[in-house]
Amino acid sequence: MERKAVSAAFRSSASSRILRAEIKESFLMAMSALAAHKLRSALTLLGVLVGVFSIIVVMTAMRVMQNNIETELSQLGANTFEIQKWPAVYFGGPEGFEKFWRRKNITLPQGRQVMERATAAQNVGLETFFWDGNGQAISRYEKTPPNVRMIGGSPGTFPAHNWSVQDGRALQEPDVESARDICVLGGALAKTLFPFGSAVGERVKLSGISYSVVGVLESKGAMLGSDQDNFAVIPITTGLNRFGRTWRSISILVQAPSQAKYDDTVEQVRGILRAIRKVEPGKEDDFEIFSNDSLIGQFKSFTLTVRVVVAVISSIALIAAGIGIMNIMLVSVTERTREIGIRRAVGAKKRNIMTQFIMEAIVLCEVGGVIGVALGILGGNVAAIFLKVPPVVPVDWIIFGLLICSIVGIIFGTYPAFKAANLDPIESLRYE
């Protein structure tokens, strides 16, 4: 029994060595054939190159955008959700947007009622944005272009956004109740307006109105090519008094005590707001609730459709390239009929001939695929350079693209290989 086992193992080892040697020989012959017909090979692999390039360049660019948009969407703090009249992300047409337009605004009194009644929440913040067409900030040292965001907030806005105070203090309840003329500056804005010292205690003009600076926030850096710290926070009541409140809808930021209590907090706040806004039982909410995860999920579902469409279009290009490869391989079989006859005459089996020609088709596809991948990564990361964000290498799509190349080579190289393997050796030797 031991002798039989040893013999079987030896035969298996010998077979694997023969197979490896055969594959290596077929690969070398394939590379030799490609080198012998450089122009024809280049024109043939061009179709594969274009197909793989179109997949990789789009997927790389989308991965760059996705990584940074997901980071930008993740601006809420831990266990925090936001409630507002409008959806945070909307991919539908104008007819669907009309439903949101007809909703009643979320008012400051409604937000205050949520603050008082949401016992499950750790923090509740009220927020809105103010823009009069002149978002310019001016200090006694510098002034900015008219691109400064002015945010109306409350004390709960700061933990909800994960804002940390670097100097001074955040807004407090008396600031909101008394509608004080104070502000908290984003780190970048403070550095621009007061390059030589602390901004706390100084006066600044925001949209032509003077405010006292009571705090400066820690900087978070650039995002998608722009500075996300270029803003100022004023008490929401101060902003509503000056910019109007009749047509303005506010946002409610709610932070749950923990992840375990997150769902319960969402349901409690939803029930409170439905009761305040008199939404009848059985009817859908007339407001939107979203979190970091829900926003990222919506973005991924949207980009999934784009990725599928790109993959389908690129697959069509690869199929067309595969047909071209089959055509070239059939021509190659005809040109090398005598060579095939000689190989068969000296002992090559049908499987050896099939392996040789299938390997040529795979190598042809893979060479085009590798070039397409390299160009696609470079082209896709142009978006990263433009947006000043880290480049990415979509390893999953690279593997997918090269795998597709191998499949195309096997599928479209099989028929020419089968035809070559089944040529009559005697007739092949006579072929001129």
Image: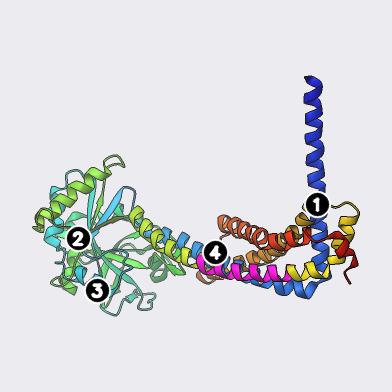
Q: Which residue matches tag 1?
A: 24
Residue 164 lies, with reference to residue 387, above or below; the image says above
Q: For mark 1, does the 10 Å Cα neighbourhood hold few (<14), some (14 to 19), or many (20 or more) residues?
A: some
Q: Which residue matches tag 3?
A: 95
The three-letter code of the residue at mark 2 reads Phe
For marks 1 and 2 on the same chain, the one whose residue lies earlier in the sequence: 1
Label 1 – label 2 distance at C-alpha: 65 Å
**Residue drawn at point x = 31 percent, y = 76 percent:** 135
Residue 199 percent coordinates (x, y): 35, 64
Residue 162 visible, this orientation: no
Q: Which residue matches tag 4?
A: 60
Q: Is residue 369 left or right of residue 271?
A: right
Q: Would you say the residues marked 1 and 2 are in contact, meaning their CB atoms lie under 8 Å apart?
A: no
Q: Which residue matches tag 2?
A: 287
- The question of residue 320 being in magenta is answered with yes
Residue stretch rendered in magenta on the structure: 312-329
Q: Would you say the residues marked 1 and 3 are in contact, meaning their CB atoms lie under 8 Å apart?
A: no
Label 2 – label 4 distance at C-alpha: 36 Å
For marks 1 and 3 on the same chain, the one whose residue lies earlier in the sequence: 1
